Image (spheres, rainbow, N blue to C red):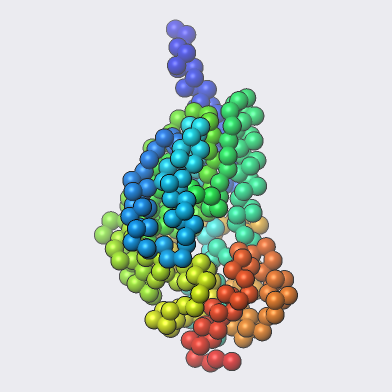
Amino acid sequence: MAPTGRESRRGAAATLEAEIRARALELGFNVCRFARADVAPEQGERLHAWLRDGAHGDMDWMRETAERRAAPRALWPEAASLVMLGLNYGPDGDPLASLTKPDCATISIYARNRDYHDVIKGRLKQLAGFILSRAGAGDAKVFVDTAPVMEKPLAQTAGVGWQGKHTNLVSREFGSWLFLGAIFTTLRLEPDPPEHDHCGSCSQCLDVCPTAAFPAPYRLDARRCISYLTIEHKGPIPLEFRAKIGNRIYGCDDCLAVCPWNKYASAGREGKLAARAEFGSPPLAELARLDDTAFRALFAGSPIKRIGRDRFLRNVLIAIGNSARPE
């Protein structure tokens, strides 16, 4: 019996999905999953509640883009499917080792290399072009953290991982260490099953937070988060948090690093995202001596450059103040 039109379309979609996954792996992505674009995750409601509580701090852009961020079709009504991508950036060694060196700086793992936005966006564009060429029709748009897209809940809907109690994505294969990207397309692709929560009774990520930034599981108060304070917050850092920041000058990985699912993770193999040796644990005194030209040269191509030298020096001076041997 010849296949029906519906069966033929389903088979064609399955073939296209397989080709997309294969091409994604060729481009260096480690995970590729699909979801429908008409999902309206309950996370949208949680986002609005979070904003009403003021937990976003100075990030006014979160409030200004909330309606478009709440659901994919609010951002692009023509979207039919989502292609959710993950790229492993797992550290090669203990991500918290530099915390034991008070006269040196600790930089978040994701910022010890080239800005991932630049690396991933180009590959998303390549994959989107491949998808449309194979389909022979349709349209697509790519997103990587800079647009109002709720990547983490959408990634969970597509089966990439789940949002842990620290609100970050956790993968059974890659632990806490996945960069996320998304392709919205007008094409209709068969969705993958969503991932379920596997945190259980574990609370290690909540317990380790130096500033108690989690008022409850799955809820972050950015105003208390070291990553927010050292990256997004533009004014003076409140006195109550300065000692707890320790030697962290850009971001914080504590809640990510202690997740038990990291035992299944492996070091990232993307050469363009390899950690720069000079960002491992740079001496605080040397960072404090950087003038504007030297700052721009050292952090060219790094996400650290975007906070500017003034905010960077604010963080460095706090770390020096916390050091047992300030210089």
Question: Where residue 136 sits: x, y (%)?
Answer: 62, 24
Q: Nearer the viewer, residue 23 or 301?
A: 301
Please tell me which residue is depicted at 55% across the width and 84% down the height of the picture.
Answer: 317
> Can you tell which quarter of the image residue 261 is in?
bottom left
Is residue 26 at all visible to an observer of this figure? no
Residue found 54% across the figure and 34% down from its top: 185
- Asked if residue 282 lies left or right of residue 265, the reply is right
Quadrant of the snapshot with the N terminus: top left
Quadrant housing the C terminus: bottom right
Establish if 155 lies above or below 129: below
Q: Position of residue 226 (x, y in %)?
A: 45, 71
Q: Position of residue 38 (x, y in %)?
A: 41, 35
Above or below, 317 against 197 in this view is below
* Above or below: residue 225 compared with residue 123: below
The residue shown at (63%, 34%) is 130
Number of numbered discs overlaid on the protein picture: 0
Q: Nearer the viewer, residue 261 or 303?
A: 303
Residue at 63% over, 45% down: 123
The front one of 151 and 204 is 151
